[in-house]
Image (cartoon, coloured by chain):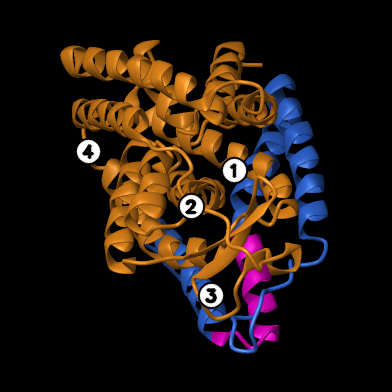
Amino acid sequence: MSWTEFGLALVTSVVGAVGGLGGAVILVPLLVLTGTSARAAAPLGLVSVAAGSLSAGARQIDERIVNHRIGVTTELFASSAAVVGALASGLASDRFLKQVLALVAISAAVAGGRRKGVRNVAQPGLSAADVGEHIGALSGVYQLDGGYVPYEARRLRLGAALFAVSGLLAGLAGASGGFIKTPATSEAMHVPVRVAAATTTFTIGITSAAGLIVFALQGRLDLPTCAAVSAGSIVGGRIGAGVQSRLSPPQVRRFLSALLLVVGVILLVRG
Amino acid sequence: MTPDSPRVDSPVRGLGTALRVVVVVALGLSVAGASIGGRVGRVCAAIAISTIIAAPLLRVVVLSAHWYRKRDRRYAAVGLGLIAIVAAGAVLAAL
């Protein structure tokens, strides 16, 4: 067992799930700082993302909070860009990938620190029977504190552009891009943050699958290490989801932002 | 709800249960792949990683089939388009 990778994946998945930024954006910089090359760390990051996404999937389906139509539509752009990023990362130097990773970490720190809380309000006249996504539209209703909140995705072009950026970063650096996707869905497309976060958890699994297929065909997957990261991420994702309900996400996000900022600056200086 | 309101989609039956089973299988294979050395360990790790790659893509295929049955052909096509993009990426990487 690669205990270092297992432990790092477990801890970062717990912290990432609690903070809502995803574990890979912390895991990949930490792996690089502990001696793994950026080329080798990127596939491990995507394994962590895919495993964490899978781990959270069943519960989110039961809660009927994921909007799959929004996810699949925006994922067209993210996965296309992830494939391009993964192909390009095979040609890029380790120094360039470290710099990309540093910028990703600093961007995640800024995005995490600026994220807003819940802002949508319940609408009278809606009931539990209305909860779910709508057929033929990028809209739906979700339950919040005993009320029922309708929503509709807007500014799809802007959202698509931001998803393409997140996919490119996922393919290049192995980060989930969730720190871009959730604010893009929430702030740019006006989807409630809980729906946006759950839908992002679904879509980052697809983005990472697209990138991992490319990495596998390039022979860049070290299978025992990937398995250790996968095990750590599945267990960590489950623990993090449980811890999330007992801690204050804004406080954890601020801690994560500070940590990512430090990691990003160190990577920039040492890169 | 009014008669003009959009119709709420029903969840895909059994999808949540199937995902729970996949998570348990992927975890077991991952632990085996990381713990057991040699060829058996590598095979377990390969199946574990293949499982976590395939699961979200199969979820999209199942959703597309579900949407097609609900006569939501636009989003069924979007789902299949997404699978086609991932497949195209695999072909490009293999070249």
**Residue A173 within the magenta-colored segment of the rendering:** no
Q: In the rendered image, which residue does mark 4 sit on? A: A92
Q: Amino acid at mark 1?
A: Ser
Side of B60 where A113 appears, left or right: left
Q: Mark 2 or mark 1: which is in front? A: 2
Relative to residue A122, is residue A223 depicted above or below? above
Q: Amino acid at mark 2?
A: Asn
Q: In the rendered image, which residue does mark 2 sit on? A: A120
Secondary structure beneath disc 1? helix
Kindly report the distance in space between the C-alpha atoms of the residues bearing marks 3 and 1: 20 Å
Secondary structure beneath disc 3? helix
Which residue is painted at 27% across and 20% down in the image?
Answer: A264
User: Residue pushed farthest front?
Assistant: A124
**Which quadrant of the figure has residue B2?**
bottom right
Q: In the rendered image, which residue does mark 1 sit on? A: A53
Which residue is painted at 31% across and 41% down in the image?
Answer: A172
